[in-house]
């Protein structure tokens, strides 16, 4: 029975979610905190430091005793400066009442001071000599704690910086570094096996772009992946799936799912319990399949994509990328938007048509290449997927279309 795009996306996402959950039960991997860190935390990352590590100034200004400025609203209060305090300084000396310390953003607050007054809120608007000795006039009072970033206000030593399951994106790496964390336990990444089928690929008569495209996508998401070729031979495909199952969490095949006479993937997998092979209401990429490969006590989900190169690319974006990205701790949804179409198009009834396009400086969307599924060069030249809904059979120039950015 055929499916809508949304129905098939939910089925694929559920399969990948189950695979990711099973993989997460495996032993976590201890990883150093480097710029290359990715995936999701397997255990809470506990701070070794207070962050910030000391009370510091939020502004370029003057560290003061707030009590010294209590009457500044009635008449200006003039106070002498001591030596400047800059970021990177060791702990400055205690600030005596009746004096102020010129202080730069991020510099440690002198003991005794309890507020910072921005330099532009003083009458002179200047810091004075580096060693102090200037007289600064203040014209308004200040509350204790003003423009002070207190020690440990972001996280305290011993508190969790990030909880188990948190994605390890660049900001997470930065947080771990400032918290003094050198290593973390990372959930093991999903292991993908990509199987491209077809005698024409094995012989080299047709270049195998599909497995390399999917391998590149997997690596971009930080997932472990391997690529394999198999001819249109059921026995060879079965043997390969048996070899892959013990060390793989998800198998993705390309080709062999339609209604031809040598559809090896469909021939091998469709008789399996729970398998589904039919059409999804999308162009390109209509023929799709889902199955499971049983080997000893392992059950490995298999997502079966068509063989045309653009169908593989579109299928990955619609069905595979979002759940794989979630499993990998990456942003699941592509940036999207709408814009006026720069030229007319036609679309088959009852199918989501996915065209390729570019966003022009005026916000309009121009098409790149025709609608065919055999045009990988045109796809590579595009920066958008242009989505034409199932109930739309034609669009005129100027009509609004939805797009996803892919480059």
Image (cartoon, rainbow, N blue to C red):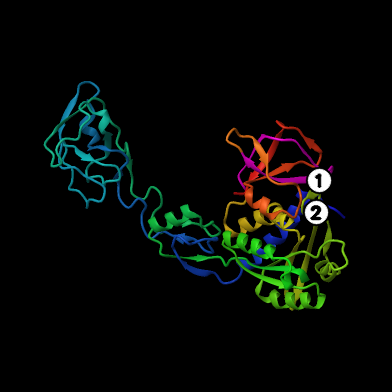
Q: Is residue 66 above or below residue 25?
A: above
In the rendered image, is residue 100 in sight?
yes
Q: Does 250 sit left or right of 347 as displayed?
A: left
Question: Decide: marks 1, 2 in contact (CB < 8 A)?
Answer: yes
Q: Which residue is mark 1?
A: 351
User: Mark 1: which secondary structure?
Assistant: loop
Position of the N terminus, as image quadrant, is: bottom right
- Name the spot of residue 120 as percent of width and height, x first: 27, 30
- Name the spot of residue 369 as percent of width and height, x first: 70, 46
Q: Nearer the viewer, residue 324 or 372?
A: 372
User: Mark 2: which secondary structure?
Assistant: loop
Could you tell me which residue is drawn at 71 percent across and 70 percent down? Answer: 204
Q: Is residue 120 above or below residue 167?
A: above
Q: Which label was assigned to residue 217?
A: none
User: Which circle's residue, 1 or 2, is located before the other in the chain?
Assistant: 2
Could you tell me which residue is drawn at 81 percent across and 75 percent down? Answer: 233
């Amino acid at each position: 029975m055929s499916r809508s795009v949304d129905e098939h996306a939910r089925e694929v996402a559920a399969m990948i979610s189950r695979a990711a959950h099973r993989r997460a039960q495996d032993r976590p991997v201890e990883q150093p905190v480097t710029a290359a860190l990715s995936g999701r935390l397997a255990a809470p990352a506990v701070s070794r430091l207070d962050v910030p590590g000391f009370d510091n100034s939020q502004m370029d200004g003057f560290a003061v005793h707030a009590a010294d400025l209590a009457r500044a609203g009635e008449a200006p209060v003039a106070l002498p400066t001591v030596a400047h305090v800059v970021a990177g300084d060791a702990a400055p000396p205690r600030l005596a009442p009746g004096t102020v310390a010129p202080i730069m953003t991020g510099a440690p607050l002198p003991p005794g001071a309890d507020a910072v007054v921005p330099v532009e809120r003083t009458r002179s608007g200047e810091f004075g000599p580096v060693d102090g000795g200037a007289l600064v006039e203040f014209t308004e009072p200040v509350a204790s704690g003003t423009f002070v970033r207190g020690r440990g206000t972001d996280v305290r030593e011993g508190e969790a910086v990030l909880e188990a399951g948190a994605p390890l994106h660049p900001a997470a790496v930065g947080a771990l570094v400032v918290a003094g964390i050198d290593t973390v336990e990372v959930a093991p990444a999903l292991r993908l096996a990509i199987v491209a089928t077809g005698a024409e690929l094995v012989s080299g008569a047709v270049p195998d772009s599909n497995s390399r495209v999917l391998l590149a996508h997997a690596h971009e998401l930080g997932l472990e992946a391997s690529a394999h070729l198999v001819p249109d031979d059921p026995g060879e495909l079965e043997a390969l799936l048996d070899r892959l199952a013990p060390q793989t969490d998800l198998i993705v095949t390309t080709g062999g799912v339609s209604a031809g006479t040598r559809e090896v993937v469909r021939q091998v997998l469709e008789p399996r319990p729970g398998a589904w092979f039919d059409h999804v209401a999308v162009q390109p990429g209509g023929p799709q399949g889902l199955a499971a490969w049983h080997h000893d006590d392992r059950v490995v989900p298999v997502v079966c994509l068509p063989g045309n190169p653009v169908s593989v690319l579109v299928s990955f974006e619609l069905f595979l990328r979002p759940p794989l990205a979630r499993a990998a701790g990456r942003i699941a949804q592509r940036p999207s938007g709408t814009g006026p179409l720069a030229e007319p198009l036609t679309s088959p009834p009852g199918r989501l048509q996915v065209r390729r396009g570019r966003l022009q400086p005026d916000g309009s969307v121009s098409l790149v290449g025709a609608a065919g599924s055999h045009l990988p060069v045109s796809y590579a030249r595009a920066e958008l997927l242009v989505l034409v809904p199932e109930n739309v059979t034609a669009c005129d120039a100027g009509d609004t279309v939805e797009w996803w950015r892919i480059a």
